[in-house]
Amino acid sequence: MRVRAKRVAPERALAHLRRLLPPLFALVGLLVTAPAAMAADGVGIYGRTTDKAVTFFAFGLIAFFAIFVTVASLIQIRLDNRKERRKEDLERLGSR
C-alpha cells in the first residue's frame, strides 16, 4: 500500500511564507545585532552600562506602560461609547 503526499496549492504556500517572513526577519535582526549588544566590558550600542542608566531605563519602561495602558483604555472607552450610540441609533431607526 502506497501513501501519497498531499500537494499544497501555490496560493497556500505563499500564504504560509508571508506568515513566516516577519518572525524570520525579526530573528535575523536579533542575531545580527546581538554581538554589538553583548560587547566586552558592558560597552554596547548605548555605551558603558551604569546603575544610573539601568535605573532611568527601568523608570522609562514603567512610565511607558502606565501611559500605554491609560491611552489604550481611553481609546477603548471611546470606541465602546460609539458602538453603544450606533446600537441605539439602529434600534431607534429600525423600530419605525
Image: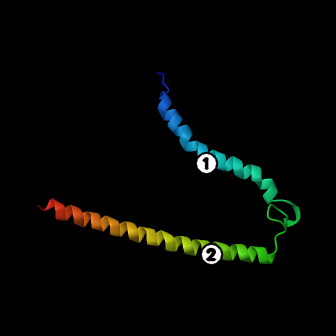
Measuring from the top left, give residue 76's x and y in whole percent: 42, 68
Residue type at mark 1 is: Pro
Residue 23 shows which numbered tag?
A: 1
Task: Mark yes or no: residue 8 visible.
Answer: no
Q: How many marks?
A: 2
56 vs 25: above or below: below
Which residue is pictured at 54% across the width and 43% down the height? 19
Tell me where residue 84 sits by quadrant. Answer: bottom left
Measuring from the top left, give residue 79's x and y in whole percent: 38, 66
CA–CA distance in space, label 1 to label 2: 26 Å
Measuring from the top left, give residue 31's x and y in whole percent: 74, 50
Which residue is pictured at 79% across the width and 59% down the height? 37
Residue beneath disc 2: 62
Tell me where residue 50 sits by quadrant. Answer: bottom right
10 left or right, relative to 86 = right
Task: Mark yes or no: residue 12 visible.
Answer: yes
